[in-house]
Image (cartoon, rainbow, N blue to C red):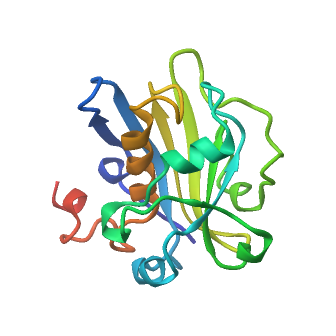
Amino acid sequence: MRIASSVAAGLLLSACAAGGGINIVHTVIIDPGYSASDVTISGVPIPMRVVGAPRDGATEAETLAALTLPGRLGARPARAETPADFSAMRIVFAFAPLSVNRICTADAGSSGNIGGKAGQTEVSAALCRGDRQLSYAILRTAASGPRDPEFRPAARLLLGAIMPPYANQLTPRHPLGAQ
């Protein structure tokens, strides 16, 4: 059974300071098996798989270079997933969002789709262990992709949403729980 966050926690709005674009992180799902301490001790940087392609045509290497973990996890860059990483904690980052049921098993080359509609980029991300999704969220941003300077802060919002500091995002200790 998954814990679906409330509307307040599930819909995060943030104005980018650089260009004033709006980034929306929505459909945040945290599985009861998620543990913030597992993320902290699993090793940084966490391996990541990129599925699909951004609107700006950035390569997988450019996408990985644009992604950094939230500051509380060391703000380190992502590294490409290897076959040995499948059973470990890892992130799947999918342009042309994949469903929560498919994202952890998606092959890096399985989606030739480009994420987003005219003027926006859509990405889904999940924290996975094996084929099990521990957390999931979708980002919609005006940034065209990893080559756009506005993409980095938008992607950090998404990564922060799938790796919250607490398993229950509605605890009083979490900033969104106080709203």
Quarter of the image where one finds residue 57: top right
Vertical side of 21 occupied by 1: above or below: below
Whether residue 171 sits left or right of residue 122 in the image: it is left
Could you tell whether 39 is left or right of 176 in the image? right
Viewer-closest of 107 and 69: 69
Residue at 58% of width from left, 50% of height from top?
64
* Residue 165: image location, x then y, percent: 33, 71
On screen, 136 above or below 171?
A: above
Quadrant showing the N terminus: bottom right
Question: Relative to residue 149, is residue 79 depicted above or below?
Answer: below
Residue at x 16%, y 60% (from the top left corner): 178
Residue 144's spot in the image, x, y percent?
52, 25
Residue at image x 19%, y 71%? 173
Coordinates of residue 148 in the picture (x, y in percent): 46, 28
Determine the image quadrant of residue 15.
top left
- Viewed as shown, does residue 63 lie left or right of 176? right
Would you place residue 13 above or below residue 174 in this image?
above
Give x and y (percent) for residue 127.
57, 65
176 and 147: which is toward the camera = 147
User: If the image is split into quadrants, where does the C terminus sit?
Assistant: bottom left
Q: Residue at x 46, y 27 (%)?
A: 143
